[in-house]
Image: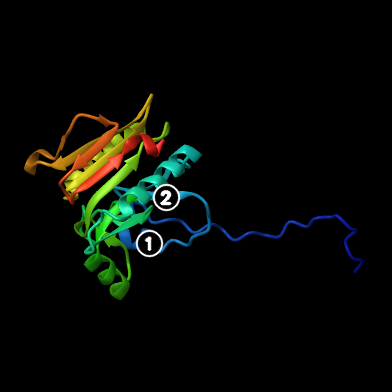
């Protein structure tokens, strides 16, 4: 049989894509192969959702925030950027929630538990989540994740936004009412919970 001429392409039969079990449990979501590099997927009540790709300003802000927090986070906590968190909003056999906050402050004990047991970090091991609002994530971060993080029992949630100046809205759990939101702060942000912290917000922009 003669060889195909140079440049000719023969289409090979492709296997049928494996049907995804929807809605998905957290374990089924974790077991998915990582084939779409560079994109971030989250799980919302069993459905896969794609997080928008961050813009450069978002990434610079995240890096600058980590640098300012580095020496202020106490030894029993750790800073973890962009990591899957099981929000533990459903039983293991039920459709689940997995979110990827831009930054999370988690317990050292939680990291050690995950290292030993595998799986994901859990909401109960997180003391603070931070979302840097982007044009494609404003509604999700302000409303949907705001409620989900509160329902998951995460004590503190910060939303950072770029307008004329960088602002930070600090939210803390207020019992059955979910989060209580403080007024947005510009300039210098200080807080005593979940640990004493001082941030120069203009240096995040």
Instruction: Give the image location of residue 85, x and y in percent.
Output: 30, 56
Q: Which residue is mark 1?
A: 30
Instruction: Give the image location of residue 203, x and y in percent.
Output: 38, 38
Q: Place residue 59 in its image quadrant.
A: top left
Tell which residue pokes out farthest to the top in this image.
Answer: 164
Instruction: Give the image location of residue 35, x and y in percent.
Output: 53, 58
Q: Which residue is mark 2?
A: 41
SS at badge 2: strand
In the image, taking residue 63 as reference, residue 118 lies left or right, namely left
Tell which residue pokes out farthest to the bottom in this image.
Answer: 116
Q: Note whether residue 25 is visible.
A: no
Label 2 neighbourhood size at 10 Å, few (<14), some (14-19), many (20+)?
A: some
Q: CA distance from mark 2 to mark 1?
A: 11 Å
Q: Which image quarter holds the C terminus? A: top left
Q: Residue at image x 29%, y 73%?
A: 117
Between 5 and 116, the one lying in front of the other is: 116
């Amino acid at each position: 049989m003669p060889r195909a001429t140079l440049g000719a392409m023969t289409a090979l039969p492709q296997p049928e894509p494996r049907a995804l079990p929807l809605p998905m449990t957290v374990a089924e979501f974790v077991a998915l192969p990582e084939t779409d590099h560079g994109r971030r997927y989250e799980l919302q009540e069993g459905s896969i959702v794609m997080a928008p790709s961050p813009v450069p300003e978002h990434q610079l802000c995240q890096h600058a925030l980590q640098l300012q927090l580095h020496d202020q986070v106490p030894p029993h906590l750790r800073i973890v950027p962009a990591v899957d968190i099981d929000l533990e909003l459903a039983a293991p056999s039920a459709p689940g929630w997995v979110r990827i906050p831009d930054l999370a402050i988690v317990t050292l004990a939680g990291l050690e538990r995950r290292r030993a047991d595998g799986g994901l970090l859990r909401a109960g091991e997180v003391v603070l989540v931070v979302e840097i609002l982007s044009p494609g994530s404003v509604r999700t971060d302000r409303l949907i994740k705001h409620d989900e993080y509160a329902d998951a029992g995460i004590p503190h949630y910060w939303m950072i936004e770029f307008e004329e100046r960088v602002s930070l809205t600090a939210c803390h759990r207020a019992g059955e009412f979910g989060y209580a939101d403080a007024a947005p702060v510009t300039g210098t942000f200080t807080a005593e919970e979940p640990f004493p912290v001082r941030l120069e917000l203009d240096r995040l922009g």
